[in-house]
Amino acid sequence: MQEAMNVRHQRLKLLALIAVFALPMLTAWIMLTWRVGIPEEHTAHGELAPPVPSLPEWPLVERQASFDGGDWVLAFDCTRDCEALADRWWRMHRALGREAPRVTRLRIGGSAEALPGEEVSQWREMPEWQAAGAVWLLDPQGRVVLRYDDSVAERDVKDDLTRLLKRNPDPRAAEEFEGS
């Protein structure tokens, strides 16, 4: 009798252990299959993956040699109120702190001198997707990841950029680490 109780107790322990590992997997599968409890909204503040060509296809007067495929690019249209826009995005760039060297700003338009960390170019012709004051966030391969209109808050762009930099580690830092 005692031995039968012991076997039953051991079997219950085994079933409980299996349930501890199987129930989360079953729950995740149900959530994914029936889309229960999965948020439908994006966390990005801008337009995600807009229909904009990659940076090498942009109609710019001069190609930027400094875009070596390693930096994220914050490109902004500066066809009106250029000094205020350039200062606005320069301040946001500085607010990135130690991640700031991973981002290059590309000012398109305006005649003022380039601020530190900024590249300047001009539109050769205005593309149909261009909007005055628009901001585009490009990945290291030159693809547009996010697009913002001119009314976006700097904090929203900084939040999105910080999230992207955190989720995408710098491959150049990994190479330096492995090489030493």
Image: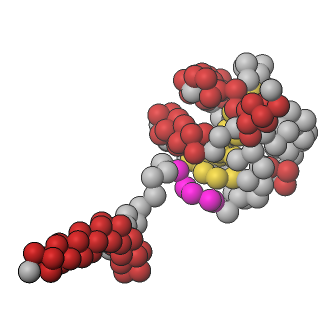
In this rendered view, identify the residue nearer to me: 170 or 20.
Answer: 20
Q: Main secondary structure of the magenta part?
A: loop
Residue 114 position (above or below residue 26): above
Is residue 99 visible in the rendered image? The answer is yes
**Residue 88: quarter of image:** top right
Q: Nearer the viewer, residue 149 or 16?
A: 16
Q: Is residue 4 left or right of residue 127?
A: left
Relative to residue 65, is residue 15 drawn left or right?
Answer: left
Q: Residue at x 41, y 80 (%)?
A: 33
Residue 146 percent coordinates (x, y):
60, 51
Can residue 164 be seen at all in this image of the molecule? no
Image quadrant occupied by the C terminus:
top right
Question: Residue at the location (78% across, 19% down)?
Answer: 113
Residue 18 is one of the magenta-drawn residues: no
Q: Position of residue 30 (x, y in %)?
A: 36, 78
4 versus 179 height, above or below: below
Q: Quadrant of the N terminus?
A: bottom left
Q: Position of residue 165 (x, y in %)?
A: 60, 39
| Residue at point 73%, 23% (across, down) | 117
Q: Quick check: 140 above or below 98?
A: below
Which of the pair 36/54 is nearer the observer? 36
Quadrant in the rendering for residue 63:
top right
Residue 80 in the image: state x and y as whole percent: 65, 35
What residue span does the magenta drawing correspond to? 46-50
Q: What's the residue at 63%, 45% (across, down)?
A: 168
